[in-house]
Amino acid sequence: MFRDANDAPVGLVIVLDGSADVSSPEVIRRIDNIPVRFHVLPDGLAASIPSPPGELAYESADCSGPPLVNPTLFKFKSFPAPDGGGIAYAGPSSSRTVRSSLLRPYRVDQCLNLNGVVSFAFPDRCCIGGGTGIGAFSPVLTLDMDTLGLVPPFHLDVP
């Protein structure tokens, strides 16, 4: 078990030596009743997947509103937040109707040649609309150390 400076639990260790992407230990913890994996650094946390999702779905036709992900691809995993700030994870899934998708990475010329293009967002995001799909999707939720009440530095607690 990893603990914070106040001896509060951070998460249960599942991989002590990390992964090829992040060499720090990986833990799992329930956040709002959802098991989420992430790496523990001495002074912070890191996502279990090194890059943000390549596709975000939206219920709007123009990639506005809360982003959604395919829950199957991100079950138990954390990833860099789509806005670039912090760590995110897939919330509870439910049936949703999606009308647009934000894809990355794309160059402007690649994006503008796609059917159904709505817009291009720098540096590398392409919004595709026009289609409607119904399926299971999860909202992208943020993993926040302050909300969890965690205080670095973190340490391994071995009985």
Image (cartoon, helix red, strand yellow):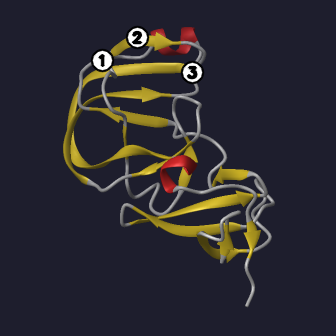
Instruction: Point out the frontmost of discs 3 and 1.
Output: 1
Q: Amino acid at mark 1?
A: Asp
> Looking at the rendering, which quadrant does residue 73 occupy?
bottom left
Quarter holding the C terminus is bottom right
Q: Are marks 3 and 2 in contact (CB under 8 Å)?
A: no
What's the mark number on residue 106? Answer: 3
Q: Amino acid at mark 2?
A: Ser
Front one among 123 and 134: 123
Mark 1 neighbour class, 10 Å CA radius: few under 14, some 14 to 19, many 20 or more = some
- The residue under the point 52% across, 37% down is 54
Q: Secondary structure at mark 3?
A: loop
- The spot of residue 143 in percent (x, y) is 51, 49
What's the mark number on residue 62? Answer: 1
What's the mark number on residue 8? Answer: none
What's the mark number on residue 119? Answer: 2
Front one among 72 and 26: 26
Q: Are marks 2 and 1 in contact (CB under 8 Å)?
A: yes
Q: Secondary structure at mark 2?
A: strand
